[in-house]
Image (cartoon, rainbow, N blue to C red):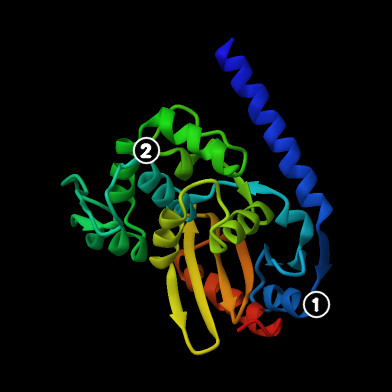
Amino acid sequence: MVKQMKRIAIGIIVCLATLQVHAMEWTSNLDITALFQKHSVNGTFVVYDVTAGKLTGHNERRAAQRFIPASTFKIPNTLIGLTVGSVNSVDEVLPYGGKPQPYKTWEKDMSLRDAIVISNVPVYQELARRTGLERMQQNVIKLGYGNQDIGAAVETFWLKGPLKISAIEQVQFLAALAKNQLPVAAEFQQATSEILLIEQDDHHKLYGKTGWQNAPNEGVGWWVGWVQKDDRHYAFALNMQMQQESDAPIRIEIGKAALKALGIL
């Protein structure tokens, strides 16, 4: 009975989120489409202008399609970990576990502040273990993140599924985070945002996180985040089909070019 009610609750939340997505106006941008064509890349890019309540981008159909979030889930993972007390702060050092890793840079105990920069998977898996499956599921539902289904493997649900999220859902989630409007304490939202800051000047701040499902093999690559420009917020999400390791920098290259084409950067 409890499981059945849980499935019904998730279904209602997903339906409401879907209605909200369809209510927003979408405008296709030919300059952004040209960027994907230039690189012969199958993907999507969407920007959510929070003030105007409008979506702009390339490939609306793919923007609404859900994919495994991969390391972009480190954003809600951080937020949830802080919320439930799995870590005291983003500067608390977590163990990586001592096992050999695909990248030597991951073979080090480190804080979330340092781990998110190099996308350290074992450190974030330790964070997820501390949170536990039940609390993780409760908070993924609370945040309305993607299909809200984390399955039974707390260490891998964002890397292998069943959790999936669309680019449009990403920008909705990120816009709420950027404005401290998620249903968790503002201090935890601010701490999570702080470690995502990539660059800034007198007029803007750029926050972002990459992801690559099935890295370094063929899979879906992500670059998501937001730009705070003066008093406006622009949440963005890019995903694309990755074929090989040399495709990795293309995510940010296309993403930044798209933001410049829109006059956001």
Which circle marks residue 150 in the picture? none
> Which quadrant would the N terminus be assigned to in this image?
top right
The answer to whether residue 216 shows anywhere in this view is no
Which circle marks residue 155 in the picture? 2
Q: Is residue 76 left or right of residue 113?
A: right
The answer to whether residue 194 shows anywhere in this view is yes
Position of 53 relative to 138 (above/below):
below
Under tag 2, what secondary structure? loop
Q: Residues within 10 Å of mark 2 (few under 14, many from 20)?
A: some
Residue at point 61%, 61% (across, down): 175
Residue at point 57%, 63% (across, down): 179
Residue 223 rendering spot, x and y as whole percentages = 54, 65
Under tag 1, what secondary structure? helix
Given residues 10 and 88, the one toward you in this image is: 88
> Which quadrant would the C terminus be assigned to in this image?
bottom right
Q: Residues within 10 Å of mark 1 (few under 14, many from 20)?
A: few
Q: Are marks 1 and 2 in contact (CB under 8 Å)?
A: no
In the rendered structure, which amino acid carries the disc numbered 1? Leu
Given residues 64 and 171, the one toward you in this image is: 171
Real-space CA distance between mark 1 and mark 2, rounded to the nearest whole angstrom: 40 Å
Q: Which residue is mark 1?
A: 30
Which residue of the protein is positioned furthest toward the top in this rendering? 1
* Quarter occupied by residue 24: bottom right
